[in-house]
Amino acid sequence: MGRYILDFYCPRLRLAIEVDGQQHRAPWMVDYEDERFLYLKRRGIQIVRIPNELLIRDYLMAFEYIEAGIAGAIASR
């Protein structure tokens, strides 16, 4: 999307699913992530962030995050 890479994106819902690893918490990533978030938000794209650890530890909870993101995207249409 623009100059940014999204892990998963549904154009119909304008919903991005991002699986975040440790690199997303690195100090040098903070400004980049903020800039990226604002870019996507200005384009009406909602983002669901799922930490890698959650996906590994409790994939059903990760699925609930995705379901909530889908419901929110549908409600905001």
Image (tube, rainbow, N blue to C red):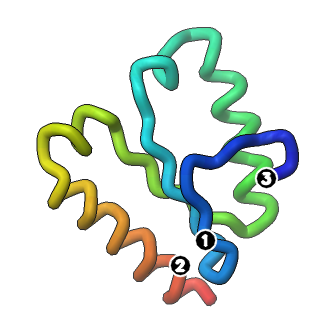
x and y, in percent, of residue 62 in the image? 26, 55
- The CA span between labels 1 and 2 is 10 Å
In the drawing, what numbered circle is on residue 10?
1
Marks 3/1: CA distance?
Answer: 11 Å
Residue 12 lies in what quarter of the image?
bottom right
Residue 10, placed above or below residue 42: below
Of the two numbered discs 3 and 2 on the same chain, state the one appearing first in sequence: 3
Residue contact between numbered discs 1 and 2, judged by CB atoms under 8 Å: yes
Mark number, residue 72: none
Determine whether 39 is above or below 75 in the image. Answer: above
Q: State the residue at coordinates (50%, 88%).
A: 75
Task: Tell me: 15 left or right of 39.
Answer: left
Q: Residues within 10 Å of mark 1 (few under 14, many from 20)?
A: few
Q: Amino acid at mark 2?
A: Ala
For disc 3, the marked residue is: 1
> Relative to 77, is 72 above or below?
above
Would you say 16 lies left or right of 60 here?
A: right
Say above or below: 71 vs 68.
Answer: below
Q: CA distance from mark 3 to mark 2?
A: 18 Å
Marked residue nearer the N-terminal end (3 or 1): 3
Q: Are marks 3 and 1 in contact (CB under 8 Å)?
A: no
> In the rendered image, which residue does mark 2 sit on?
73
User: Element at badge 1?
Assistant: strand
- Disc 1 marks which amino acid? Cys
Percent position of residue 40, x then y: 73, 54
Can you say which quadrant of the picture contains the C terminus?
bottom right
Q: Residue furthest right?
A: 2
64 horizontally vs 69: left or right:
left
Labels 1, 2: front one:
1
Q: Residues within 10 Å of mark 2 (few under 14, many from 20)?
A: some
